[in-house]
Amino acid sequence: MFVRPRVIGNKSSSLLETKEPRHFPIEFDGPVRDTDSFEITLPPGYEVEDVPAPVDADYSLASYHSKTEAKGVVISYTRTFEIKELSVPVNKADELKKFYRIIASDERNTAVLKVGK
């Protein structure tokens, strides 16, 4: 059985997933620092076989960190998302695009459960 530890909320963005070149800086409304923490209790008879690797994406403009851990019959998932620069110049748009792709990949990760012994 597969379980997605990131239960709700998206931090990724398809803002820069366009074919047209960017001509203006990316402007954010304000600084952001969000932390999510989820705990998922396993169904009876299941145990964790595998969890996603931690993610650490730290850029000058933003950072994202996530960690999934198995603790007995509970999967714990925490993540922190931070926007550091309110204006991202055009020459850093590819860096921001890479950053959002890392987050999107993490948001799709799954933990693997197996029937216990």
Image (cartoon, rainbow, N blue to C red):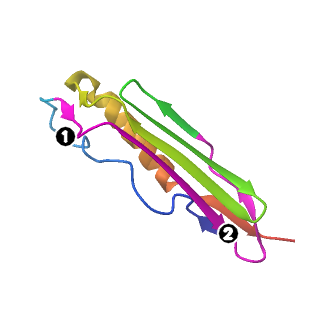
Name the residue beneath numbered marker 1: 19
Q: In the image, is residue 70 part of the stretch drawn in magenta? A: no
Q: Is residue 18 shown above or below 75?
A: above
Q: Position of residue 40 (x, y in %)?
A: 63, 65
Which residue appears farthest toward the bottom when viewing the image? 44
* Residue appearing at x 35%, y 28% in the figure: 61
- At label 1, the amino acid type is Lys
> Label 2: how many residues lie within 10 Å, few (<14), some (14-19) or many (20+)?
few
* Residue appearing at x 32%, y 36% in the figure: 31
Query: How many angstroms separate mark 1 from mark 2 (CA)?
Result: 42 Å
Q: In the image, 66: left or right of 28?
A: right
Quadrant where the N terminus sits is: bottom right
Q: Magenta region: which residues?
A: 25-54
Q: Is residue 52 shown above or below 91?
A: below
| Mark toward the start of the polypeptide (1 vs 2) | 1
- At label 2, the amino acid type is Thr
Residue 102 visible in the current orientation: no
Q: In the image, is residue 30 part of the stretch drawn in magenta? A: yes
Which residue appears farthest toward the left when viewing the image? 23
* Residue appearing at x 70%, y 75% in the figure: 43
Q: Quadrant of residue 71?
A: bottom right
Q: Quadrant of residue 55?
A: top right
Name the residue beneath numbered marker 2: 41
Secondary structure beneath label 2 = strand
Secondary structure beneath label 1 = loop
Q: Position of residue 9 (x, y in %)?
A: 41, 58
> Label 1: how many residues lie within 10 Å, few (<14), some (14-19) or many (20+)?
few
Between 33 and 23, the one lying in front of the other is 33
Q: Position of residue 94 (x, y in %)?
A: 30, 30
* Residue appearing at x 49%, y 43% in the figure: 80
